[in-house]
Image (spheres, coloured by chain):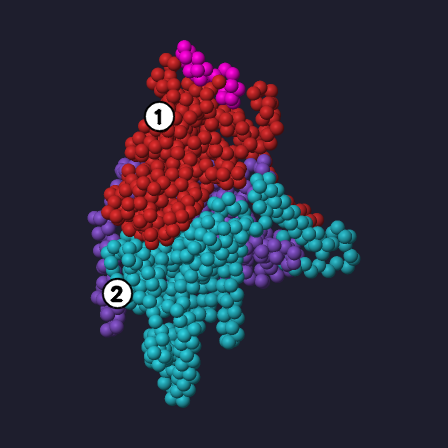
């Protein structure tokens, strides 16, 4: 009888260990392709540099193996990423997800979107839930430096703006002394707002809201005088808002929005970066999704090289990556017109450098 | 978040609100030969003070009823529900990605309901006092109103039919449970466990990772269920450890239980979302957000289940243990064969209570950005046709009705079970 | 795993590896060892990971500047993170201090209503309880704040200012309030005079009660005495106490003067109180039913009114049974106050959320948050235990 007891004690002990290990140890029994180290580097001649990388180094292979891209988006922001009636996603951010998927998998629809809040977005990327984060996230030094992320490019130059009721009589932010301002919690805007009002030497009272639905509830019921967020977000808000509102001219901060990837995977970083540049270059060359096929093998050497990139050694699986991208989503202007155009946001600096903007794609050479 | 009292230590709170609820002193019953008038007089107009109260509260009730009817039938713009994707509320936005067919899902649900029915049938005690008519009406009528309201938002007949099917499965299961022959009855625990596992398998298409794409009501129920099921072993072990005579282990159990019960669930969920990555080596496989939430909810619920089970353990008379000792059984056998079965049986109603509060607590997932029912509201309200147009009250009313229907019917069922099991009366 | 004391009397001493006492200790050391090792591993990983990602491993970030503004606090953007946490802690405390009495009062009323012999009163009580406790508290918070407060309170432009001293709007509820900054000492002194009056009156009433048997009504008399003493002191010192009326600011956007109660605070506190009251009501009802019926009948027999019956006979006895479950509900209301993150009230969980987004290590920020809640929980448990012990000592 007592021998049994010993056995049972051991069994219980074992259970304890199991529980402890289940919640407290580095159990790697479930193989996840994202973090699996590549064991055969010879497959990838261009990847020699990557051998030294410790973790997260094989995002591209993981994406190809799994057959789709995991893309983190907002999901509730018209113009950038929004869910349509049939459950499909549209928007500028979404188009860049599609472009990356097209470049890697030749199928712009091979994307799985994950809706992320301002709170969860960075953790999702750090923990490998998603491959790339294209959720109107602002590129800042502390995010680049501390959070273990790196921003690949800027797809939209934005700035925080102020939205007020048209009949409120506010002409600029300087008029708004002693007002209540709605601002989303956990954003760079929250801090920029403080700095801007402080510099103007006027006071305000913040009303922190969790998401845009809460903004509507607060703003429409008159609980706050103004709503501060990126101007693109304001335009999207204005386009759908059931009332007469104005976006003030003040630009309260610099908010370069673009895709971010995990630190430590330079190949995938390059892929995302050059996918963005490809849309800039295509616009500069006058290549659109409609005429891209005609340009293949063009007499223009630069265009030919762009569409059939044999030498650059970027980690794209094929040399016609630019063709894949352009035929899937078009050039930057097309993407912009399709998604941001209907919101009526002035283009501002979001134009090619040739047209007075600051979009500039490095040459494919 | 809240254990809603059910999980509090024994004594009055062992069965918590449930324990006290059925003990409700029945109002003066209508004897034979008493007419409606007598009831009116006795209950409403006994004396002057009573009559004044009746008038005041009658006015309040009429006013609230009028307002409710006015809202539900006239002012509310329900198109946000019936023109919107009702499917989102039920299974979430990304359910299509899983490739699970609705037939499969319904098969799983039917299996689960059948198991529930059998379980309720097993607890049937022909000698238990019958339910009062009022209680029975409330138990059936309340949820019925809720279900009719929810179904009225559907456009086709299919949901109504399959919902009727659920009721049929419940009743059939109940009858089967009552008639199970003794030998099978003894193994019923395993059968129910197997059926539940099968149901879970069917619902997730035998790939648990599909849960990552669940949303809406389905996610709410799956997370709550996984939470309670996974936390059960933790709870039992912790309860035994807390009542054990091991001076080194008891503080561990007490520490775990009190630590978890001392902090809000949302802080644990934050831990799962933001901080868990720091606690593991960089090359560890951190599961997806929903799984992380399930792990944290399990840890959370484990502490409360431990307290429920501890209450059950305390309800086992000391004589039982002494009798076991007198027979020369080993302490393990006494615990396993004598104490635990009785203790767990007594904890069932409180465990259902814990499940209900877990079901409500799953709503917190919206704060960490997951799309359970409240999260789906945000998704639907961000759609082009509804965005920024003030559809918030309607959406919340609809979701609230779903929660209410589920929680109310389950808490009533738990009360009923408590009477039948005779918890607190033995 | 055992719950029974080992008492085995064997004539010969068993070998060490079969000696139950030895095995018991071995087992315990093993378990403690495993748990300890697991915790150590987690700690070690945390330190390594934090260092690898260049995040601080200590709590030095508490001295950094918070950089975000906290509603209702001037210059709060210059606060250190530590001070921001402290402000959040106080804001949570504000919810608890008002929420607990509110939910208790409401819960007691509803609980008694459910035992009424009037059918309609009973029905209202039942509907209340079933409605509130079967819907998640988070949903109630949303409904109270987003629907009831924001949509149904007047807007500030509607200029609802009763008596020109109150302001009612969905930007805040302003009520006139003493101006403690201007004459804090006078204010405290006057309160002291009032309290002395209350004590004096209570002593007198108790004597009257003992000598003549008249009800003492100490609370009522004390309150009146307090007001009278305050009024006398106020006029004797030449209108020394000034108060600020609450008015709408010149630009018509904010509330100035007096005390401004934020709508999110109102929404959160009311929603928590309403929800918790449904649980308290069930506890109250159960406790009252647990009191022997004869007690109530005896009270009726000596012609006590319904109010007196509850106040002097039933509730004091029921209260003794109520304490442990009530304490657990108070703990719940405290923990549920963390749901303020979903609306716009900046309490301690919101502070955590905002701090952790500022390139601060989420892990440490979270540990501080949990620690704060543990202090609340511990405080409530201590108070409950104190009452529990005191009340159970007095009887039996």
Chain letter of the residue beneath label 1 in the structure image: A
x and y, in percent, of residue C200 in the image: 42, 83
Left or right of residue C20: residue B24: left
Q: Which chain is rendered purple in the image? A: B
Chain A: what color?
A: red
Kindly identify which numbered label has been placed on residue B216: none
Res C9 → quadrant: bottom right
Magenta part of the chain: A296-320
The residue that disc 1 covers is A355
Seen from this angle, which residue lies furthest bottom?
Answer: C211
Q: In this view, does C255 lie above or below A44?
A: below
Q: Is mark 1 on a helix, strand or loop?
A: helix
Is residue B7 at least partly visible in the picture? no
Name the residue: 61% across, 57% down: B251
**Apparent side of residue B330 relative to residue A196 in the rendered image (left or right):** right
Q: Is C66 or C229 nearer to us in this picture?
A: C66
Locate residue C194, reporting x and y percent: 40, 78
In this image, C333 relative to C243: left or right? right
The chain coloured cyan is C
Which numbered dot is residue C164? 2
- Residue positioned 28% across, 45% down in the render: A171
Marks 1 and 2 close (CB-CB < 8 Å): no
Question: Residue A164 placed where, x, y %?
Answer: 29, 45
Residue at x 46% of width, y 21% of height: A363
Which image quarter: residue A246?
top left
Q: Is residue B262 magenta?
A: no
The residues bearing labels 1 and 2 have C-alpha atoms spaced at a distance of: 59 Å
Most foreground residue, B113 or C36:
C36
Q: Label 1: how many residues lie within 10 Å, few (<14), some (14-19) or many (20+)? A: few
Residue A299 on the magenta segment: yes
């Amino acid at each position: 009888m007592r021998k049994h007891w010993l056995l049972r004690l051991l069994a219980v002990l074992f259970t304890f260990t199991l529980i402890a290990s289940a919640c407290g140890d580095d159990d790697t029994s479930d193989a996840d392709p994202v973090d699996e180290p590549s064991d055969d580097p010879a497959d990838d001649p261009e990847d020699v540099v990557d051998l030294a990388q410790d973790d997260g180094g094989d995002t591209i292979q993981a994406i190809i193996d799994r057959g789709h891209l995991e893309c983190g988006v907002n999901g509730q922001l018209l113009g950038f990423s929004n869910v349509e009636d049939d459950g499909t996603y549209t928007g500028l951010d979404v188009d860049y997800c599609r472009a990356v998927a097209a470049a890697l998998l030749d199928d712009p629809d091979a994307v799985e979107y994950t809706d992320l809040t301002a709170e969860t977005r960075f953790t999702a990327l750090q923990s490998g839930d998603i491959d790339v984060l294209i959720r109107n996230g602002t590129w800042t030094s502390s995010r680049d430096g501390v959070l273990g992320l790196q921003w690949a490019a800027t797809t939209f130059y934005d700035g925080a703006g102020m939205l007020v009721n048209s009949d409120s009589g506010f002409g600029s932010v300087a008029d708004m002394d002693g007002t209540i301002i709605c601002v989303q919690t956990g954003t760079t805007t929250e801090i920029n707002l403080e700095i801007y009002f402080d510099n103007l030497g006027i006071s305000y009272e913040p009303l922190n809201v969790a998401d845009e639905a809460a903004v509507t509830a607060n703003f429409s019921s008159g609980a706050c005088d103004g709503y501060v967020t990126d101007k693109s977000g304001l335009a999207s808000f204005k386009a759908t808002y059931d009332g007469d509102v104005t976006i003030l001219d003040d630009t309260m901060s610099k908010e370069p929005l673009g895709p971010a990837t995990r630190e430590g995977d330079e190949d995938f970083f390059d892929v995302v970066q050059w996918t963005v540049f490809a849309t800039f270059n295509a616009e500069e060359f006058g290549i659109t999704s409609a005429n891209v096929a005609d340009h293949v093998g063009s007499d223009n050497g630069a265009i030919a090289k762009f569409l059939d990139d044999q030498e650059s050694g970027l980690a794209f699986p094929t040399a016609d990556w630019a063709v894949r991208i352009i035929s899937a989503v078009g050039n930057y202007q097309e993407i912009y017109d399709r998604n941001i155009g209907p919101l009526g946001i002035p283009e501002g600096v979001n134009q090619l450098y040739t047209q007075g903007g600051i979009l500039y794609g490095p040459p494919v050479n | 978040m809240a254990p809603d009292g059910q999980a509090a230590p024994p004594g009055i709170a062992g069965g918590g609100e449930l324990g006290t609820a059925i003990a409700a002193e029945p109002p003066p019953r209508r004897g034979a030969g008493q007419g409606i008038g007598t009831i009116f007089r006795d209950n409403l107009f006994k004396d002057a003070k009573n009559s004044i109260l009746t008038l005041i509260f009658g006015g309040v009730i009429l006013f609230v009823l009028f307002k409710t009817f006015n809202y539900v039938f006239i002012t509310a713009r329900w198109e946000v529900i019936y023109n919107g994707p009702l499917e989102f509320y039920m299974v979430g936005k990304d359910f299509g990605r899983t490739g699970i067919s609705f037939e499969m899902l319904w098969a799983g649900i039917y299996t689960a309901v059948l198991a529930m029915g059998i379980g309720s049938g097993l607890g049937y005690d022909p000698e238990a006092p019958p339910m009062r008519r009022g209680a029975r009406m409330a138990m059936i009528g309340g949820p019925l109103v809720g279900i009719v309201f929810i179904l009225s938002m559907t456009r086709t007949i299919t949901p109504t039919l399959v919902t009727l099917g659920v009721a049929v499965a419940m009743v059939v299961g109940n009858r089967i449970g009552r008639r199970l022959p003794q030998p099978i009855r003894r193994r019923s625990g395993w059968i129910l466990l197997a059926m539940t596992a099968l149901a879970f398998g069917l619902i997730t298409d035998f790939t648990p990772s599909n849960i990552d794409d669940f949303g809406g009501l389905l996610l709410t129920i799956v997370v709550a269920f996984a939470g309670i099921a996974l936390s059960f072993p933790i709870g039992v072990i912790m309860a035994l450890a807390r009542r054990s005579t091991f001076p080194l282990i008891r503080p561990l159990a007490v520490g775990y239980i009190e630590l978890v019960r001392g902090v809000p669930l949302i802080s644990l969920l934050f831990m799962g979302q933001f901080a868990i990555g720091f606690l593991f080596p960089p090359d560890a496989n951190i599961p997806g957000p929903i799984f992380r939430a399930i792990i944290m909810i399990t840890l959370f619920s484990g502490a409360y289940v431990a307290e429920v089970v501890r209450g059950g353990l305390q309800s086992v008379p000391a004589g039982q243990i002494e009798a076991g000792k007198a027979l020369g059984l080993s302490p393990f056998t006494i615990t396993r064969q004598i104490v635990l079965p009785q203790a767990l049986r007594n904890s069932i109603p409180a465990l259902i209570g814990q499940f209900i509060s877990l079901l409500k607590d799953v709503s917190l997932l919206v704060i960490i950005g997951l799309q359970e029912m409240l999260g789906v509201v945000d998704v639907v309200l961000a759609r082009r046709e509804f965005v920024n147009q003030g559809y918030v009250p309607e959406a919340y009313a609809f979701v609230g009705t779903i929660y209410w229907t589920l929680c109310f019917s389950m808490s009533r069922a738990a009360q009923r079970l408590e009477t039948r099991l005779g918890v607190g009366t033995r | 795993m055992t719950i029974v004391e080992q008492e085995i009397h064997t004539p010969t001493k068993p070998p060490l590896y079969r000696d139950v006492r030895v095995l018991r200790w071995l087992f315990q050391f093993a378990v403690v060892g495993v748990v300890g090792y697991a915790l150590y591993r987690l700690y070690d990983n945390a330190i390594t990971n934090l260092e690898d990602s260049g995040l601080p491993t200590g709590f030095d970030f508490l001295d950094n500047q918070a950089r975000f503004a906290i509603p209702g606090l001037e210059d709060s953007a210059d606060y250190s993170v530590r001070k921001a946490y402290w402000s959040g802690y106080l804001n949570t405390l504000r919810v608890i201090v008002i929420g607990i009495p509110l939910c208790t009062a409401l819960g007691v009323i509803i609980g008694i209503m459910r035992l009424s012999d009037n059918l309609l009163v009973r029905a209202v009580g039942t509907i209340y309880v079933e409605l509130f406790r079967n819907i998640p508290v988070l949903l109630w918070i949303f409904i109270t704040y987003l629907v009831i407060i924001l949509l149904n309170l007047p807007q500030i432009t509607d200029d609802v200012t009763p008596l020109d001293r109150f302001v009612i709007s969905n930007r805040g509820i302003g009520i006139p309030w003493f101006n403690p900054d201007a004459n804090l000492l006078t204010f405290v002194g006057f309160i002291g005079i009032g309290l002395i009056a209350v004590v004096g009156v209570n002593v007198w009433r108790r004597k009257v009660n003992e000598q003549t048997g008249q009800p003492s009504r100490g609370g009522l008399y004390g309150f009146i005495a307090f007001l009278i003493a305050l009024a006398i002191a106020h006029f004797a010192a030449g209108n020394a106490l000034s108060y600020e009326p609450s008015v709408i600011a010149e630009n018509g956007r904010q509330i100035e003067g007096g005390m401004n109660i934020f709508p999110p605070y109102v929404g959160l506190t009311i929603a928590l109180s309403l929800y918790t009251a449904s649980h308290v009501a069930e506890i109250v009802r159960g406790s009252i039913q647990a009191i022997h019926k004869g007690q109530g009948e005896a009270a009726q027999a000596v012609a006590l009114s319904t109010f007196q019956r509850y106040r002097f006979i039933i509730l004091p006895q029921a209260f003794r049974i109520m304490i442990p479950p009530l304490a657990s509900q108070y703990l719940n209301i405290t923990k549920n106050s963390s749901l303020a993150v979903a609306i716009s009230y900046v309490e301690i969980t919101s502070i955590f959320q905002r701090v952790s987004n500022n390139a601060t290590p989420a892990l440490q920020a979270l540990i501080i948050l949990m620690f704060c809640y543990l202090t609340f929980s511990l405080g409530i448990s201590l108070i409950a235990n104190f009452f529990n012990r005191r009340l159970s000592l007095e009887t039996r």
